Amino acid sequence: MTVKTLLSEDRLPTRWYNIVADMPEGSLKPPLDPATGEPVGPDALASIFPMSIIMQEVSGERHIDIPDEVREVYKLWRPTPLIRAMRLEKELDTPAQIFFKYEGVSPAGSHKPNTSVPQAFYNREAGIKRIATETGAGQWGSAMALATQMFGLECTVYMVRISYDQKPYRRSMMQVWGADVLASPTDRTNSGRAILEQDPESLGSLGIAISEASEDAATHDDCNYSLGSVLNHVLMHQTVIGEECRLQMEMAGVYPDVVIGCIGGGSNYAGLAFPFMRDKLAGSREIEFIAAEPAACPTVTKGSYTYDYGDTLCSTPLFMMHTLGHDFIPPGIHAGGLRYHAMAPLISALVDLGHMRAVAYGQTEIFDAGIMFARAEGIIPAPESCHAIKAAIDAAVECRDRGEGKIILFNLSGHGHFDMSAYDQYLSGNLSDYAYPEEKIKESMSRIPKMG
């Protein structure tokens, strides 16, 4: 059962949803200047973001109009299909109905263009010539390379070294769309050189790559920085997923009891979940929200909810969020998009309020789930998305054991066509699990700033 045919492109959402407007009063803490401990204003971000993006970042408006030029690009792949996983339901012998929103149909193969396209648009409107950004698994870098090509901008991507080596075709995809792709840490920035001096064989991390890309933007007048997750405006752009999905589920005559997604920085899950979370915050629906992360980078399940830097070299303001410590370097797991030390402040606040919970999985069990899904539904999922699939399977099995016919919805955030080396390792029995040692987590968290 596929619901895309019920939603034509003229029903594509015209507005993004900003959950900030519906958050409980006092639940969101402002970013702080690390030197003074005082809240930072929009001017603090003006060296790396266009003012239109900054205003979205601090906005309390419930809805922001999607520019017509952005909607026209969206129409290249949106609306994306909502699919009922009936073959997976049969495999699990569950009375639950499992639906997934499939974002892998975008040109870049993931949900990421939902925000890269508007970010490129707003930067072009501001007269910017080049975008500097980071990427973990390569999905965000691919999306930004695509978007800058659409709007006539140059693009520099700092790609986490372990993913640069593991995923050469993601790198090739970015280069096809004209991007300059660098293995991070590099010797081109002060941030990269500082890391290489400490560890010449560094595998890199999203925190390091963010430091390099933001430094690049801050030191070049014609260049701005672009982030693929974590910040409020990024999560808001992604709500086109959930707003579309609400219409599709209404047409199918169903409404979710459980909403699931994988989390690294939080954008794909926020994009699906926030338009449904609106109902829970209003008290009109009781929905269970489950966020799935890797046990090798257990940001929410084992991190602290406190103020910390968004990058490794401490160049950003301090954000109130779940964190493992800004200098936490996760192991080289294949779910490169989930190797980030912190979580989006909005996701973190919802977890802290008890509206959402997190679960952590090992690498082997998420590939078990991904293989089961691929053999049932025919789609090979990205390793990141396998975390959401595992959580959905667990929820469906629980329904089977309890005899409950719940509606389970999850976000299949991207396909795994460029992740076949990971599947090769799994199929050959060479894929290992890694649970980050507690003492290492404590060591990293001991260096979190003592503020707030």
Image (cartoon, grey):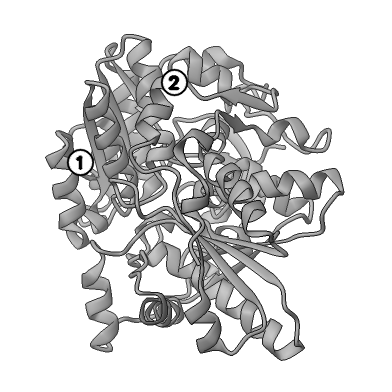
Viewer-side label of 2, 1: 2
Which of these two is toward me, 184 or 242?
242
Left or right, residue 382 beside residue 1 = left
Residue type at tag 1: Thr
Task: Give the residue number, with chain letter if any, for mark 2.
Answer: 68
Residue 212, x across and y down, in percent: 31, 35
124 relative to 18 in the view: left or right: left
Other residues around mark 2 within 10 Å, as few (<14) / some (14–19) / many (≥20): few
| Nearest the eye: 46 or 50 | 50
Residue drawn 39% across the image and 35% down it: 74
Question: What x and y, as percent, mark residue 312?
Answer: 42, 42
Q: Is residue 268 above or below residue 28?
A: below
Residue 367 percent across, percent down from the top left = 39, 78
Location of residue 355 (image quadrant): bottom right
The answer to whether residue 159 of the structure is visible from this angle is: yes
Observer-nearest of 84 and 286: 84
Local packing at callout 1 (Cα closer than 10 Å; few below 14, some 14-19, many 20+) is: many
Tell me the element at label 1: loop
Kind of residue sitting beneath label 2: Asp
Q: Are marks 2 and 1 in contact (CB under 8 Å)?
A: no
Give percent across and percent down for residue 50.
43, 15
Q: Above or below — where is 429 with respect to 363?
A: below
Q: Residue at x 52, y 50 (%)?
A: 6
Residue drawn 71% across and 54% down? Answer: 351
Label 2 sits on a secondary structure element that is helix
Q: Is residue 112 above or below residue 445?
A: above
Asked if residue 66 lies left or right of residue 432, the reply is right
Instruction: Using the image, tell me which numbered label, if any, was put on residue 366.
Output: none
Q: In which quadrant is the C terminus drawn?
A: top right
Which residue shows up at 68% across the image and 59% down it?
A: 253
**Marks 2 and 1, how far apart at CA:** 38 Å
Numbered circle sitting on residue 186: 1
